[in-house]
Amino acid sequence: MNILFCSSEVVPFAKTGGLADVAGALPIALEHEGHQVRVALPKYKMVKEESDSAVIGEAIKVHLIRNDELYMRDGIYGDEKGDYPDNLERFMFYCRQTLELMKSEGFRPDIIHCNDWQTGLIPVYLKTVYKDDPFFKDTRTLFTIHNLAYTGSFEESEFDKTGLDRALFSIDGLEYYGKFSLLKGGLVFSDAITAVSPTYAKEIQTKEYGCGMEGILKARSADLYGVLNGIDYELWDPAKDALIYEKYSPSSIEGKCTNKERLLADMGMKTAAGAPLIGTVGRLAYQKGYDILAEVMDELCGMDIGFILLGTGEERYHKIFEEIASRGNSKISINLCFDAALAQKIYAASDMFLMPSRYEPCGLGQLISFKYGAVPVARKTGGLADTVFEYDAKTGDGNGFLFEKAEPQELLGAIKRAVEAHKDGPGWQRLITKIAGYDFSWDKSAQEYTRIYEKLKAKK
Ligand code: ADP
């Protein structure tokens, strides 16, 4: 099939989070399935290619949609002042231009696979502006939700810029609590919808997780699927990782010790002999629950552990962790920046990996941490609930430590259970050897997407 994959972030060109990882890897796995795949991405300043296209995988053409006025800026979505005020124009242009480009290239997609709000206008334009265009007669759209909380909402006064019929500013169209949402456009007008894990696909149909979209998602539940993300083991594999201190694999898992010792030394940390190192890497945003973690930092500091955090994001969380860092405890290391190399070192060095997320559509952190033999301590939600299961020291079943409520004492309880389990050296070795051998590669997800594409293609 001809597949056009549309995403506002694609590794290795532009990344702020997990969406970029998905968009850099899934097209390649789809190519392995035998599809003809193309990718479209805005040509931001950070995209270093000279020409307006690049190649990934064997022969996947990545179209770099060019508009210097809209994209030649330092950020992807905004700067320190917040979102760029012309994001509607920026992503509207991207959607329109991508469709036009397919026509001029003569690439007739069977499926346009859209991702998150930035691509939401593609299904809308196909069902309105291009409704009678023979070029797209057999094109079907799949819209994947990576994070429902980013709705891409704009003021009513901007609606006419979209060129859409005013009648679409309605409850059955793009209207969303007095504004209009590009994400909602994608949900209403696409031929099918997926969320990035089976549990998240169910959660988003409830008021608690639905961000006000639960009504439309419930109405479309027959076309809504959950497909778990994979990870790219070319990038995330301690046996190949050139950025960590010593390479290792399940059969040489003791290589983690060197990584831990060297990282502790480099970060100037001092911990008791044999104490577990707890690591975490993530965006400092409400979603990720780092404020819940901040509340148990005092208790953590009282335990025989080491703790290392790498994260960047909202100012208020920076302040909280700056204050914690200023206490000068040598058991902890707080790093408030984006640093891909340090992230890899943390995965390799950590015994446990924390993800106290309030919600987590899929989560790549726990999949990476499995591969690096760091045991996840996570909240039971979304993709975490689909991949992390409570460890049972007696039977050896399970692969992590879970807590249910987004509350400090629950998180602390799970950390304590992990620290207790860590004391059983041989049991812990078996556990980390097991998780490091898991296979969450993209092949399985690509096969599931292919089944959905085929269903869509058969649909008239
Ligand atoms: P999300 O997409 O919601 O941010 P995921 O767990 O799906 O969360 O993916 C996060 C990805 O971004 C992982 O690859 C993680 O290692 C990386 N990451 C997040 N914050 C940082 C940071 N400060 N420095 C380096 N890598 C980071």
Image (spheres, rainbow, N blue to C red):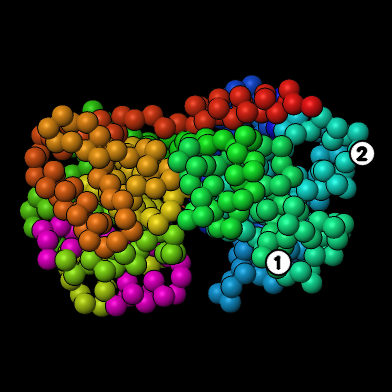
Residue shown at 16% from the left, 53% from the top: 416
Residue shown at 37% from the left, 77% from the top: 319
Q: Nearer the viewer, residue 161 or 19?
A: 161
User: On the rendered image, what quadrant is the N terminus found in?
Assistant: top right
Residue shown at 91% from the left, 38% from the top: 133
Q: Where on the picture, by quarter, is residue 150?
A: bottom right
Q: Where on the picture, by quarter, is residue 219?
A: top right
Residue shown at 86% from the left, 61% from the top: 166
Say whether disc 1 or disc 2 marks the residue closer to the N-terminus: 2
Q: Where on the picture, by quarter, is residue 195?
A: top right
- Residue 179 numbered tag: 1
Query: Which residues make up the magenta segment?
Result: 300-323
The amino acid type found where label 2 is placed reads Asp
Q: Give yes or no for residue 317 being in the magenta stretch.
A: yes
User: On the rendered image, what quadrant is the C terminus found in?
Assistant: top right
Question: In the rendering, at what x and y percent does residue 180 appear?
Answer: 72, 62
Which residue does the numbered mark 2 point to in the structure image? 132
Element at badge 2? Answer: loop
In this rendering, the answer to whether 95 lies above or below 309 is above
From the Cβ of disc 2, is ligand 1 less than 8 Å away?
no
**Left or right: 166, with 290 as reference point:** right
